[in-house]
């Protein structure tokens, strides 16, 4: 990474590329000509040179605490809630894969169905941003208007990673 930055690159992403890192890097590069200093400072904010400390690439999502407390109360203990969270975390990648395939195949009905399922599940755990993104994808599928679906799906996948981290830290504090 340091060799690339020293060679004049403005930024660097290491493999395997995480969707959230890619989105952050692209957001940093959305500057007008003549603002190269802003790009460099954005890259500097995302990376540090202390190799001894691992870099946290994905920050946990903000979950609605009221929704989580309601679930905790409904299930009576954290162990029961943890098993429900695990089902969500196991089901999420399958739903995302189905959404990815629907976008690639232009299958609006499959996109609507899987986005609806992930939206509902996300709302249950108070993952409002993920719920809202899935709702937008559901509307795309329902209307058959798939323009921008790949980009929106990338945001859904990045937010799912954040929700996954937040839920894991909630059940294993």
Image (spheres, grey):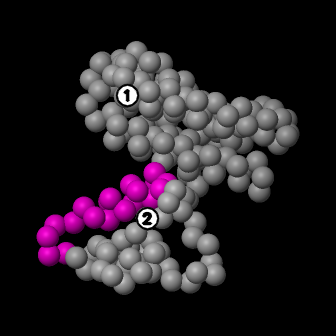
In magenta segment, residue 5: no
Task: Residue 13: give its label.
Answer: 2
Q: Residue at x 36, y 19 (%)?
A: 108
In magenta segment, residue 22: yes
Provide the residue span drawn in magenta.
Answer: 17-35
- Point out the tag, 2 or 1, that comes first from the N-terminus: 2
Q: CA distance from mark 2 to mark 1?
A: 25 Å
Q: Give the labeled residue for mark 1.
A: 103
Viewed as shown, does residue 92 lie left or right of 77?
left
Mark 2 neighbour density, 10 Å: few (under 14) some (14–19) many (20 or more): few
In the image, 133 versus 74, the foreground residue is 133
Determine whether 6 is above or below 34 in the image. Answer: below
On the image, the x and y values in percent for residue 37 come to 25, 80
Q: Are the residues tagged 2 and 1 within 8 Å (C-beta)?
A: no
On the image, the x and y values in percent for residue 54 come to 61, 72
Q: Residue at x 56, y 48 (%)?
A: 161
Viewed as shown, does residue 45 lie left or right of 49?
left
Determine whether 50 is above or below 140 in the image. Answer: below
- Quadrant showing the N terminus: bottom left
Which corner quadrant of the image does residue 92 belong to?
A: top right
Tag count? 2
């Amino acid at each position: 990474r340091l060799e690339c930055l020293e060679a004049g690159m403005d930024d660097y992403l290491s493999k395997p590329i995480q969707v959230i890192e890619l989105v952050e890097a692209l957001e940093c590069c959305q500057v007008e000509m003549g603002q190269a200093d802003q790009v460099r400072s954005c890259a500097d904010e995302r990376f540090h040179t202390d190799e001894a400390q691992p870099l946290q690439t994905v920050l946990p999502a903000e979950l609605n605490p009221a929704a989580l407390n309601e679930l905790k109360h409904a299930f009576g203990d954290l162990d029961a809630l943890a098993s429900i969270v695990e089902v969500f975390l196991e089901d999420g990648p399958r739903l995302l894969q189905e959404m990815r395939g629907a976008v690639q195949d232009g299958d609006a009905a499959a996109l609507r169905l899987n986005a609806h399922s992930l939206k509902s599940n996300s709302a249950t755990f108070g993952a409002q941003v993920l719920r809202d993104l899935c709702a937008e994808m559901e509307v795309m599928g329902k209307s058959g208007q798939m323009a921008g679906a790949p980009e929106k799906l990338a945001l859904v996948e990045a937010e799912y990673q954040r929700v996954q981290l937040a839920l894991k830290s909630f059940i294993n504090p």
